[in-house]
Amino acid sequence: LDVPDSVRAGAPAALLFDFHGFGHSGAGVWQVSRFKQLADGGGFITVYPEGLPIRLLGRDPKPGWEIERVDGNRD
C-alpha cells in the first residue's frame, strides 16, 4: 500500500489497484511498477494485492487470480 504525502487524511483520493500476473507477487509488482513515482503528483493511493495460490491452465499452483470460472469464484 502506497499513500503519498500529497494525500491528506479525511480528503477524497483516488484508489488504484495494481494486480500482479500469474506466478508473481504484490511485492514484486510494487518494485517494478512506476505508480509509486506517479502517485505523489497524481494524489492517488496505490494498492498491490497478493493473489492466493491457484492452478491455472493445468500448471502447478502459484499466486494469481481466479479467472477460469464464474460460479464459486473467490476473487
Image (cartoon, helix red, strand yellow):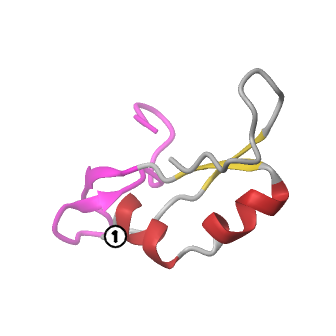
Residue sitting nearer the eye, 73 or 48: 48
Res 37 → quadrant: bottom right
Q: Which residue occupies the extreme front position in the image? A: 5
Q: Is residue 42 above or below residue 21?
A: above
Q: Which residue occupies the extreme bottom position in the image? A: 32
x, y (%) of residue 17? Answer: 61, 51
Q: Is residue 36 above or below residue 51?
A: below
Q: Main secondary structure of the magenta part?
A: loop
Q: Which residue is mark 1?
A: 24
Going by the numbered disc 1, the residue's amino acid type is His
Horizontal side of 3 relative to 51 (left or right) equals right
**Magenta span contains residue 42:** no
x, y (%) of residue 60? Answer: 16, 68
Residue at the location (83% across, 58% down)?
A: 42
**Magenta span contains residue 61:** yes
> Which span of residues is magenta-colored?
50-75
Residue sitting nearer the eye, 15 or 43: 43
Horizontal side of 43 relative to 51 (left or right) equals right
Disc tally is 1
x, y (%) of residue 34? Answer: 63, 75
* Label 1 residue SS: loop
Q: Which residue occupies the extreme left position in the image? A: 60
Residue at the location (82% across, 62% down)?
A: 41
Residue sitting nearer the eye, 37 or 75: 37
Q: Is residue 59 above or below residue 5?
A: below
Residue at the location (80% across, 50% down)?
A: 43
Q: Residues within 10 Å of mark 1 (few under 14, many from 20)?
A: some
Horizontal side of 15 relative to 73 (left or right) equals right
